[in-house]
Amino acid sequence: MKYFDEYRDGSIARALVADLQKAVTRPMRIMEVCGSHTMAIFRNGIRSILPDGLELISGPGCPVCVTSASHMDAFIAMADRPGVRVAIFGDLFRVPGSKGSLANASSRGAKVDIVYSPMDALDLARKHPDDLIVFLGVGFETTTPTIAATILAAKNQNIRNFVVFSTQKTIPAPLTALLEDPALRLNGLLCPGHVSAIIGAGAYVPFAEKYKIACVIAGFETTDLLTSLILLARQIGAGEARVENTYGRVVAWEGNMRALKMVEEIFEPCDTEWRGLGCIPGSGLKIREKYREFDAEARLDIPLTPASEPKGCMCGNILKGINTPRECPLFGTRCSPASPVGPCMVSSEGTCAAFHKYGMDE
Amino acid sequence: MCLAIPMRVTEVHGNPDDFSTSQIAVVDADGISREVRLDVVDHWPNVGDYVIVHAGFAIHSLIEEEALKNISLLKELAANMPQELLT
Ligand code: SF4
C-alpha cells in the first residue's frame, strides 16, 4: 500500500530534518509523553539528528514504569493465593516490587499467564473453571476500553470466575502535575498517538491555554514524528501555544465516543499512586459498584501496603524528566535489560531500556 | 505497546448496537489473517476499510483516503523537498 511507503520515505525524512534545523531558532525543551514514542524516536534515529537547542525529554507514558512497587506487591500477593491464576501483559512479568517479581512468584509455583488481549483472560476463565482468573489491568486510555469491553463480555456470557485488578490510569492527570512543576521548564508536548485516539485532540486545549505550552499529536512513523517536531518548534519559536494534530488519520478532535462510553459505563475515577510521581488525585480508574462482581479488590481482600522502590533506582526522577538514565549510577552496570533493577529498564517502552538499546554510544 | 500499522478488514460480524452479539472483524496484516474485536471501535468498519488495533481490539477505523490524508501536509512542510517527490 502506498501509504506505508510515503510515511517511511527516506528522502522525505531528509527534507523534514532540514526543515527541523531551520525551525529550531532558540533553545527549547519538548517532552515526548508516550513510551511508544520514546522507542520510535530512538529506533528511527531521530535522537541522533536533533538540532542543537532542541532537548527531548521522556515523560510518564510507560504504563509498566509508573506502576508503583506497592501495586506490584499486591499483584504478587494475589498470584501467590491458592486457586488464583493471574493473567498479565508480558511486560509486567519481571517488574520488581519490594520483594521480587511475578517471575519469582511463578517459579515458586504461582499461576501466571501472559496474554496478548484481556479477552484472552476470558478464554482462560473458560478453560480453568476451578481457578479465579485475575486480569492485572495496567495501562492508559488505550487499554481501558478493551478491559471495559471484556468485563461487559464476561457479564453477557455469565462468566463468574473472572475479575480485574484495575490500576488503570489517565494521562492528563500526571501532565497537570508535571506542568505545575516549574523545575521542568517545558515548552512543548509531543502528545501520544493512541491515547489521543481515545480522548481526542481537544483534550489538550486546557494545557495549551493554562500552561502556554505547545501541543502536537503525533503518529509513530519517522515522518509523523519529524512533522510534529517541526510544528512544535515553529509554535515555540513564534511564542504560540496551540493544539495541532498531525495524526489526523487516526486521532479525531472529539476522540472515540464509543470507547469513552464503554469506559464510563464500567469505570469511575479514583486517586491512585504513580511510581515516581506519588498519589495523583483522580488519576486512576476503579470498577463501579454495579460491576462489583468483576472487581478483584472487592472479591479478594488485598491490602495495598506502602512499599520501597528498588535500592538506588532513579526511575522516579526519570519519569518526571528530571534525570536521564545515564545519570543513574546503576545504568549499564548493575542494571541492564538482561538483569534490570527498575521498571524503566524492564519495560520494552521504558526510557532506560530505550537508552540502553539504542543510545549507549550517544 | 502501540501497534500503529492499519490492518485491512476482510470480514465483519455482529451488530454494532448489540454488545451481546460477537462483534468481530477478520483483518489481514501482511498476509496473515487475524480476528479482532470491534466492541470499542469508533466507527463500524466495512470490508475493505482499515483498522488500528490495540490489545486485540480495533480502536479506530479508517478508509484508505484518510490514511493518505497527512501526506499533503508532509509535502507542504518540507519546503526543500526534492522536486521529484512533489509531483
Ligand atoms: S538504570 Fe535501572 S536502576 Fe537506574 S533508573 Fe533506570 S531502571 Fe532504575
Image (cartoon, coloured by chain):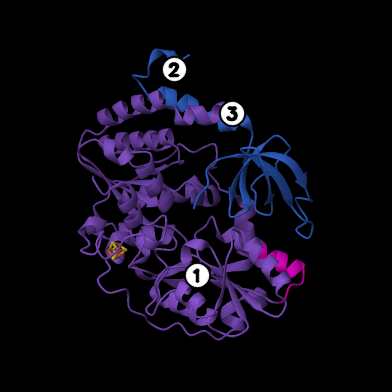
Chain colours: A purple, B blue
Circles 1 and 3 on the same chain:
yes
Residue B76 lies, with reference to residue A180, above or below; the image says: above
**Amino acid under label 2?**
Leu
Q: How many numbered circles does the render carry?
A: 3
Q: Which percent across, then down, holds residue A150?
A: 66, 63
Which contiguous range is marked in magenta?
A150-160
Which amino acid type corresponds to the residue marked 3 in the rendered image? Met
In three-dimensional space, the C-alpha distance between marks 3 and 2, rounded to whole angstroms, equals 17 Å
The residue identified by callout 1 is A167
Q: Secondary structure at mark 3?
A: loop
Describe residue A39's horizontal placement relative to residue A137 as left or right.
Answer: left
In the image, which is nearer the foreground, mark 3 or mark 2? 3
Residue occupied by mark 2: B85
Give yes or no for residue A106 being in the magenta stretch. no
Does residue A315 lie above or below B71 as drawn? below
Q: Quadrant of residue A147?
A: bottom right
B13 sits left or right of A97 in the view:
right
Which residue is depicted at the point 34% across and 55% down?
A351
Q: Residues within 10 Å of mark 1 (few under 14, many from 20)?
A: many
Q: Nearer the viewer, residue A310 or A26?
A: A310
Residue appearing at x 35%, y 24% in the figure: A15
Which of pointers 1 and 3 lies earlier in the amino acid sequence? 3
- On the image, the x and y values in percent for residue A251 come to 53, 43
Residue at x 41% of width, y 60% of height? A347
